[in-house]
Image: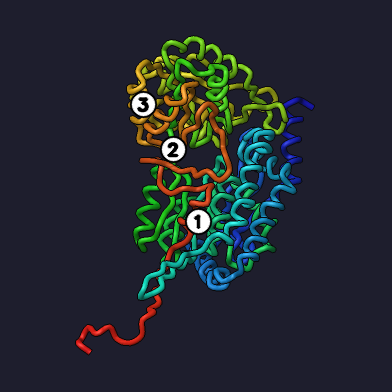
Amino acid sequence: MSNVEDVRQKHLKLAEKLFQKEYGLFIDGAWEQSSSGETIDMINPSTGDCLAKIQSANAADAKRAVEAAAKAFPAWSRTSRSQRQEIIYEMGRRLKARAEDYAMMDTLDNGKPFMEAMNFDIPMAVEQFEMFSGAPWFLHGQTIEAPNGLGIVLREPLGVCVQIIPWNVPLIMMASKIAPALAAGNTVVLKPAEAVCLSVIEFFKEMADLLPAGVLNLVTGYGPNVGEALVAHPLTRKVAFTGSRPTAQKLIQYASTNVIPQTMELGGKSANIVCNDADLDAAAEGAAMSTVLNKGEVCLAGSRVFVHEDVMDEFLGKFQDLLGRASSGDPTEHTTVLGPQASRMQYEKILNYIDIGKTEGATVAYGGGKREVDGLPDGLFIKPTIFTDVRNEMRIAQEEIFGPVTTVIGWRDEADVIRMANESIYGLGGGLWTRDLPRAHRMARALETGTVWVNRYYNFIGGMPIGGYKGSGFGREFASEALNHYSQTKSVIINLEEGPIGVFGQ
């Protein structure tokens, strides 16, 4: 048997072990087929084989899901704090107990390396359930005393929350959405990406017994077929979305139908600034990690690296050397660093941007183009790529590529690099490398972005809010602040003075 066939059979056996042949929609506590009767093939980006089929829902399915969530809301919103805590914590426990299975599901479905899924995706998803399991105890109002009355501020859940998540880190996105929503006493309709969602569906299967029917619903399918029906339904009280700006613009319009609140976490083109006093080994490692983590399919990626001219040559040498060690290969193998892009559409989009960069006059200093991987001739692999001779106004420096492509731009003046960093429609993440503490504080404050990592990129600390400035959206997730987006306040004033106040001369 050839190496190609060996690898393919390995993937097929793993898929047979981990997935069903076909999945339904999860509505009102039951699995059912879509009204359309149509399905979507879930394709393994490493081999091109079909992993499973999911339902292609339509507006009628979306309507049923929202109505089921609305029906379940009154009882769920009145559950005790200890009940919600126990359920949400058990979700995290079950995810952790089968961490290897869920990591492999995302490896097969998304193409992300298994060890990356094990060490990044699963722990971060588990953390969301663990953190928000305690939240019900701290989600409360306040009292305000006055001589003539007592003010009581109640904090109440919103109702049905529609949540739409992307394909790049599906389990993290699922956990960061449903955990705070359930903790606050809301019910949920989750719509995962149709390109990558098998791990999410499998997790819904595993936790179906934990929740009353209708509290948590799952609708799969193409966004244009269900998005408007979910968000514009008169019983929907909130929409949370992570994804692209064009989709967000449509969802915001749909949400305006019934004037409901939104949380939008959108794209990024984050600046990663290397100063002349930086630890260049650490900075190069951070840039390389940002380039290859999840194949560059990360909204927070520091894909615009601004390097001080005094250290440019040394930094580039270290950066290129590290990318040379980023092996592409079978993502199920523990030694693989770089897997295939998640879908053919994304693969072709990235290759097109590489061509655009060349046309704009930028220089491919490393990589560029597709990569052949032994045993996986149909895999959607792209070489990690560095562009130099880049101007900040170029498309490759302004538009989100969402792949293993990084632009490098030189700078000399601090005010100038801050200006270039902020000359972007986005403002999601950012990095800063310097040994000068005042400079670190000064520059971090000046950056128009929701997160700034100083001297270590992707240095996630649990409980820190994540969200965007400008075109990267609004609202915050991954922290207690998210609870404010899943609840509302009601003011109740109790009069303490008896009798009329004498407005009419009594």
Say which residue appears at 62% left-offset and 43% top-offset: 124
Residue type highlighted by circle 1: Leu
Mark 2 or mark 3: which is in front? 3
For disc 3, the marked residue is: 418
Which label's residue is closer to the chain start, 2 or 3?
3
Against 465, residue 46 (above or below) is above
Residue under pointer 2:
428
How far separated are the C-alphas under marks 2 and 3? 15 Å
Secondary structure of the residue carrying numbered label 2: loop
Q: Quadrant of residue 106?
A: top right
Q: Residue 483: give its label.
A: 1
Foreground mark, 2 or 1? 1
Q: Are marks 2 and 3 in contact (CB under 8 Å)?
A: no
The residue under the point 65% across, 42% down is 123
- Foreground residue among 189 and 488: 488
**What is the residue that sits farthest to the right in this orientation?**
1
Residue 266 visible to the viewer: yes
Left or right of 106 on screen, residue 56: left
